[in-house]
Image: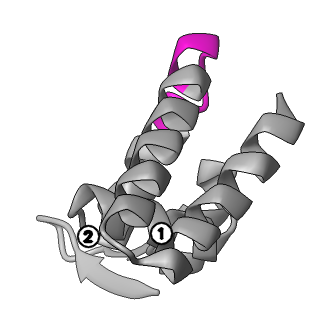
Amino acid sequence: MAATCDRQGVRESHAMLTFEDCIAFCGMDADEVEALAVSEHLPTVIAAEWTARELGTAEGRTHVIEILSERAGEARLRGDFAAADELERILERERARL
């Protein structure tokens, strides 16, 4: 916890969010967020925030599934079968959550 002083010199405590807090808030596992971050070229914490927003609506959940499906197909076409398999595994988990 970080402590600061206000204008009157009174100490205040501010709790800081951890990376784990961000992951827990978004509704996906850390490996799933990491895979989305890599595929979308985003920092992982930004991908967690984006995922939390997207998974909050039916349209957003559909959008996440579309992205996972597209990225898995692209990975398979370029011969990156490990990435394709990982994205397809995440895709199946997301479909099962709907």
Say which residue appears at 60% left-offset and 32% top-offset.
Answer: 55
Residue 58 pos. (x, y %): 64, 14
Q: In this view, does 38 lie above or below 95?
A: below
Residue 82 falls in which quadrant of the image?
bottom right
For residue 76, say whether it is visible: yes
The secondary element bearing badge 2 is classed as loop
The residue lying toward the viewer, choosing from 96 and 48, is 96
Residue 29 pos. (x, y %): 69, 67
The residue type indicated by label 2 comes to: Pro
> What residue is disc 2 on?
43
Q: In this view, does 16 lie above or below 88?
A: below
> What residue is disc 1 on?
35
The residue lying toward the viewer, choosing from 31 and 17, is 31
Q: Which color scheme does this rendered protein use?
A: one colour
Say which residue appears at 85% left-offset and 38% top-offset.
Answer: 97
Residues rendered magenta in the picture: 53-60
Residue 4 pos. (x, y %): 25, 80
Mark 1 or 2, closer to the camera:
1
Residue at the farthest top position: 59
Residue at the farthest left position: 7
Residue at the farthest right position: 96
